[in-house]
Image (spheres, grey):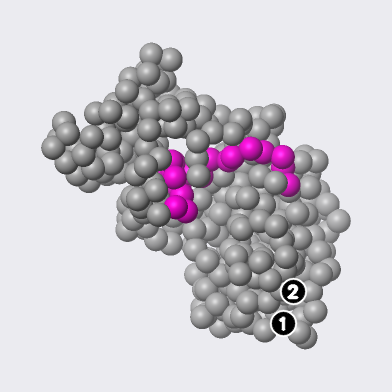
């Protein structure tokens, strides 16, 4: 166990207060597991957190609820499952809150929690951020000029185009493209775009302590195209990009068939795998362990992790939401924080 005074401070913005974010954040802090490696604190509205504690705040193994304690800075906190430390962002009319529904008030509140967390991270008051889920429609209703977490974080931190990496056990996945159609994702697979992305992923791996591991690139077509029988992208674009990356000193292999490369990554053969489109990597990670799959955002001046599920409006307010992903997000944030050198954000790349 890490010395208590040396454990990283991990800020947890509670997400959209109409969703399950406050509930899973409270449950995660009420468990003893996160305190083995981190000093986590919540960033959100006191009324929303108090309500979540009332729903599901009992410590595991007892019926006792943790004490909610407001703090002005992380150093004031007492860290353990008996206490939930909170930096109170007073921005919510709890009487007007409609659980499980899109609301402008909640979109604005969630944005301001993230804003407060980024400010703390940029000032060095916290070492990492682990975010609870927000709702894109609520952000839009609030007039927030960003579509989601990654864009908000990049805008507030002045970063260009952060990398998204999924992690579940020993499998780590970078996403070459994200929210585009499948046909557009295929059209994006060119040597000119893929080469700088491979190099950025390799640099990101070094930053989080994985520099001694190889990076693998998944194939795009079945059996990597069988030398052009099932598609030409591997021959014309992917292989040249991988070979050029090697010439530049990058430890990278591929393309390797998508039906096996994620299994090999899970077995520890590779430090990370480049998924060439959104669902290719999402399916692999979430099929293995949906609850424990988390997202890591790299290319920011601080490390950020997140649960990989949404606001779950259908079960919000019931106390039924599982905190497993939130616990994993806090633990991963704490694990990567010591490796993460604060500095200039990565330059914009080809990711979309």
- Estimate the x, y position of residue 65 in percent, counting from the top left: 67, 75
Marks counted in the figure total 2
User: What is the secondary structure assignment of the residue under circle 2?
Assistant: helix
Tell whether label 2 touches label 1 (CB within 8 Å).
Answer: yes
Q: Which residue is mark 2?
A: 105
**Residue 121 visible, this orientation:** yes
- The range drawn in magenta is 156-180
Of the numbered discs 1 and 2, the one sitting upstream in the chain is 1
**Magenta stretch: includes residue 116:** no
Residue extending furthest right? 72
**Magenta stretch: includes residue 158:** yes
Q: Which residue is mark 1?
A: 97
Q: Eyeballing the image, is 336 above or below 80?
A: above
Q: Eyeballing the image, is 279 above or below 154?
A: below
Measure the alpha-carbon separation of dots 1 and 2. 8 Å
Left or right of residue 271, residue 9 in this image = right
């Amino acid at each position: 166990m890490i010395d208590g005074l040396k454990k990283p401070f991990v800020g947890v913005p509670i997400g959209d207060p109409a969703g399950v974010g406050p509930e899973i954040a409270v449950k995660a802090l009420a468990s003893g597991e996160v305190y083995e490696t981190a000093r986590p604190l919540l960033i959100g509205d006191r009324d929303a957190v108090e309500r979540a504690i009332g729903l599901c705040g009992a410590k595991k193994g007892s019926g006792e609820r943790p004490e909610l304690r407001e703090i002005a800075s992380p150093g004031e906190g007492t860290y353990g499952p008996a206490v939930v430390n909170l930096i109170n962002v007073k921005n919510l009319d709890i009487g007007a809150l409609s659980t499980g529904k899109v609301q402008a008030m909640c979109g604005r509140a969630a944005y301001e929690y993230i804003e407060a967390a980024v400010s703390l991270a940029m000032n060095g008051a916290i070492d990492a951020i682990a975010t609870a889920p927000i709702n894109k429609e609520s952000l839009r209703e609030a007039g927030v000029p960003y579509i989601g977490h990654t864009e908000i974080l990049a805008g507030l931190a002045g970063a260009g185009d952060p990398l998204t990496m999924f992690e579940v056990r020993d499998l780590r996945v970078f996403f070459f493209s994200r929210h585009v159609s499948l046909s557009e994702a295929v059209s994006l697979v060119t040597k000119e775009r893929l080469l700088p992305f491979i190099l950025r992923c390799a640099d990101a791996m070094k930053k989080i302590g994985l520099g001694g591991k190889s990076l693998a690139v998944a194939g795009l077509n079945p059996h990597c195209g069988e030398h052009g029988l099932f598609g030409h992208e591997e021959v014309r674009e992917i292989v040249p990009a991988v070979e050029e990356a090697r010439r530049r000193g990058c430890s990278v292999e591929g393309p390797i068939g998508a039906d096996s490369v994620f299994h090999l990554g899970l077995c520890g053969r590779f430090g990370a795998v480049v998924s060439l489109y959104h669902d290719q990597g999402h399916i692999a990670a979430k099929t293995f362990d949906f609850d424990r799959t988390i997202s890591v955002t790299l290319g920011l001046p601080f490390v950020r992790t997140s649960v990989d599920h949404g606001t779950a409006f259908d079960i919000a307010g019931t106390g039924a939401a599982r905190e497993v992903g939130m616990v994993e997000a806090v633990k991963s944030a704490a694990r990567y924080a010591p490796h993460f050198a604060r500095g200039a954000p990565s330059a914009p790349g080809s990711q979309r």
